[in-house]
Image: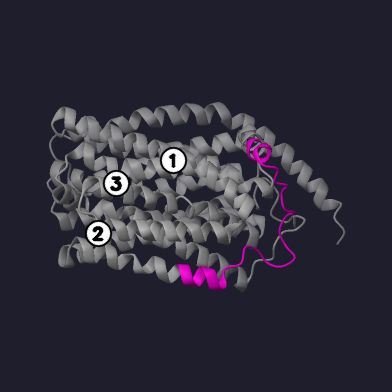
């Protein structure tokens, strides 16, 4: 990376060259993530339909997303270990099978219990996608491209969310529950065939030496070594603090809030959810470029996004009566920065860990935001039932988790920075002594 760190001109030993084949392989992995996102967020536009179909209240409805995220978050470290041990292709293949079965089963569900089981299965498969995509990018592209590659992956994933808000909502309204969800499951079948036929874990002759796997000792050592690095823990708390407001808004509670509390039509509410997604895609490119050029911008970007989110979220909640449309548009545009800011967490963990531990470290980081999202989804559902659907009280729970996360970021920031400078010096020495 260029910028103050001075690493942009160093070619690290074993650094892959990138190129068109790298784009093709990585693009195939990102396509898997794209489909997983459409499945993950499909409930966000079907929440009202699900409540009617299964005859459930707000708390029970939130359980769908909470269970899905509970499985997702709980799977992050195991998936990271599997990616480090098995490689990308095997883990992605298993993930596709699981989330496709979950989506198809959800289409056929006639009971609340069956639908819950299918969302859990979907969450398990979804959990295997993003860490695999990050590892694929690290194995096919030079390290200096890491921040931009990760942001683009997140951007394309958000395009899956865009498909959900623009297409799936309309298909659901036109054709109904079962045809919509069963038809969308066909995308999983197609991408499974493509991955099995074409995907390669890394280019021939590049990539780090395989880690030695020694049963339980390996698992314990991988987790302990990754957690010991301040950069891993800082990355987790950055992800925890930045991601969840937009995730909660898009995944479940944004549409009911805009319709029931703000008095918008379903169409207008769907348009505002689209604003979040489009803002996410645009800001992701900007953040990726800034961090690739100015490595020290990571923490200011993360903390600035948290501050902006808190301000607009608080302003809308504090507005007397219903907030004006322009204020809701501003809030949705700012929420779009949450996803790109959460990707900064991986930029703290990546340089803190060697290549053979990247999957495990990424799993720890990714667990942060989804743990916060799961907690907030539950809190909002419980508070809505307890207060008679008072969204102001329920949505105020966001500030509690933001305060916790910011305190941890400030506590770990200096320690992680010192440790990273030590690694930069070591990498420069190694690069100087590598024969041309």
Q: CA distance from mark 1 to mark 2?
A: 30 Å
Residue 82 percent across, percent down from the top left: 58, 49
Judging depth in this view, the residue of 239 and 169 nearest the camera is 169
Residue 366 percent across, percent down from the top left: 49, 43
198 in magenta: yes
Residue under label 2: 108
Residue under label 1: 369
- Residue drawn at x 12%, y 36% as measured from the top left: 321
In the picture, residue 34 is in which quadrant?
bottom left
Pointers 1 and 2 in contact (CB under 8 A)?
no
Q: Secondary structure at mark 3?
A: helix
Which label lies toward us, 1 or 2? Answer: 2
Q: Is residue 209 left or right of residue 84?
A: right
Range covered by the magenta-colored residues: 192-220
Q: Secondary structure at mark 1?
A: helix
Residue under label 3: 116
């Amino acid at each position: 990376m260029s910028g103050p760190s001075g690493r942009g001109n160093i070619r690290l030993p074993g650094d892959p060259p990138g190129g068109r084949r790298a784009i093709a392989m990585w693009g195939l992995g990102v396509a898997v993530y794209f489909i997983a996102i459409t499945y993950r967020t499909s409930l966000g536009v079907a929440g009202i339909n699900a409540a009617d179909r299964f005859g459930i209240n707000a708390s029970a409805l939130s359980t769908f997303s909470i269970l899905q995220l509970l499985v997702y978050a709980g799977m992050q470290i195991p998936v990271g270990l599997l990616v480090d041990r098995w490689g990308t292709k095997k883990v992605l293949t298993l993930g596709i099978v699981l989330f496709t079965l979950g989506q198809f089963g959800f289409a056929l569900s006639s009971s609340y219990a069956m639908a819950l089981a299918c969302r859990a299965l979907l969450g398990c498969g979804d959990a295997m996608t993003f860490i695999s995509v990050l590892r694929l990018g690290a194995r096919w592209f030079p390290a200096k491209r890491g921040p931009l590659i990760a942001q683009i992956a997140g951007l394309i994933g958000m395009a899956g969310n865009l498909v959900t808000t623009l297409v799936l909502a309309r298909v659901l309204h036109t054709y109904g529950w079962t045809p919509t969800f069963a038809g969308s499951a066909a995308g999983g079948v197609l991408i499974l065939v493509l991955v099995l036929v074409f995907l390669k874990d890394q280019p021939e002759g590049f990539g780090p030496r395989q880690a030695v796997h020694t049963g339980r000792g390996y698992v314990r050592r991988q987790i302990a070594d990754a957690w010991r690095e301040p950069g891993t823990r800082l990355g987790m708390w950055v992800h925890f603090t930045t991601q969840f407001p937009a995730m909660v808004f898009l995944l479940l509670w944004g549409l009911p809030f805009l319709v029931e509390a703000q008095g918008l039509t379903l169409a207008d509410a769907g348009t505002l959810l689209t604003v979040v997604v489009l803002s996410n895609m645009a800001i992701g490119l900007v953040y990726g470029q800034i961090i690739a050029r100015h490595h020290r911008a990571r923490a200011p970007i993360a903390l600035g996004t948290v501050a902006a989110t808190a301000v607009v979220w608080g302003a809308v909640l504090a507005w007397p009566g219903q907030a004006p449309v322009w204020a809701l548009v501003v809030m949705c545009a700012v929420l779009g920065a949450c996803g790109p800011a959460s990707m900064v967490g991986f930029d703290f963990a990546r340089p803190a860990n060697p290549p053979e531990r990247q999957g495990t470290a990424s799993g720890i980081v990714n667990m942060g935001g989804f743990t916060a999202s799961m907690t907030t989804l539950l809190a909002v559902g419980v508070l809505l039932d307890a207060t008679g659907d008072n969204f102001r009280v329920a949505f105020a729970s966001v500030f509690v988790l933001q305060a916790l996360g910011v305190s941890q970021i400030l506590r770990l920031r200096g320690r992680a920075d010192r440790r990273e400078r030590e690694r930069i010096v070591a990498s420069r020495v190694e690069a100087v002594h590598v024969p041309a």
